[in-house]
Image (cartoon, rainbow, N blue to C red):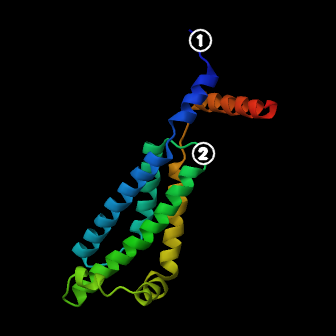
């Protein structure tokens, strides 16, 4: 039995799943946001650097479940990491504010408006939050890309070359 790199490349191409990559990244993001809130509540401090850890874990989760070879999965992981960084910071600050005013965060959910969000994005999230969010997105992008070994890389490249030749001939 001989090794056919075209079939191996086709298998690698068909194995990738954007849907499962997004599901894995979103479940990881939700879990990490809850963990961020719990850590902030336990220590009664705000930790913006947790978004960097979120970016790494979101990227690894997207790679594990999505098997992505194209640029779609890393871009999606980066967007989810930015979203998770902003929402994690917001809900962590919301819970800490609720504790400060001796109310629960659920009471404050009713009071959220565009003014609240814009004030948070300018004053609380600020430049540092944007830097952490961008770093989280870059790390998520890096870790979401599937790492192929030498044989897989050659097989996938031959599969892509064959597809390009077929498209030119058609």
Answer left or right for 34 relative to 70: left
What residue is disc 2 on? Answer: 70
**Cα separation between marks 1 and 2:** 28 Å
Find disc 1 in the rendering and name its residue: 2
Q: Secondary structure at mark 2?
A: loop
- On the image, the x and y values in percent for residue 28 come to 36, 56
Residue pictured at 49% horizontal, 41% vertical: 67
User: Considering depth in this image, is 140 or 106 the residue closer to the camera?
Assistant: 106
Q: Is residue 96 above or below residue 56?
A: below
> Which numbered disc, 1 or 2, marks the residue that appears first in the sequence?
1
Could you say which is closer to the camera, residue 72 or residue 53?
72
Q: Decide which of 88, 23 is in the foreground and name it.
A: 23
The single residue placed furthest to the left in the displayed view is 102
**Considering the image in quadrants, where does the N terminus appear?**
top right
Residue drawn at 47 percent across, 62 percent down: 81
Quarter placement of the C terminus: top right
Picture coordinates of residue 8, whole percent (x, y): 57, 25
162 or 137, nearer to the observer = 162
> Residue visible at 22% across and 73% down?
42
**Numbered marks: total:** 2
Crowd tier of the residue under label 2, counting other residues whose Cα lies within 10 Å: few below 14, some 14–19, many 20 or above: few
Q: Position of residue 99 (x, y in %)?
A: 22, 84
């Amino acid at each position: 039995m001989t090794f056919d790199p075209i079939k191996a490349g086709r298998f690698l191409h068909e194995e990738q799943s954007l849907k499962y990559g997004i599901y894995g990244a979103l479940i990881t993001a939700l879990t990490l946001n809850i963990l961020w809130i719990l850590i902030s509540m336990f220590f009664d401090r705000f930790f913006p650097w947790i978004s960097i850890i979120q970016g790494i874990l979101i990227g690894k989760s997207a790679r594990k479940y999505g098997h992505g070879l194209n640029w779609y999965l890393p871009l999606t992981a980066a967007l989810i990491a930015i979203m998770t960084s902003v929402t994690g910071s917001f809900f962590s600050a919301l819970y800490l504010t609720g504790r400060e005013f001796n109310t629960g965060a659920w009471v404050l959910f009713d009071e959220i408006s565009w003014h609240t969000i814009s004030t948070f994005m300018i004053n609380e999230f600020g430049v540092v939050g944007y830097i952490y969010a961008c770093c989280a997105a870059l790390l998520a992008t890096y870790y979401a890309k599937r790492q192929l070994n030498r044989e897989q890389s050659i097989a996938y490249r031959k599969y892509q070359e064959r597809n390009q030749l077929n498209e030119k001939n058609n």
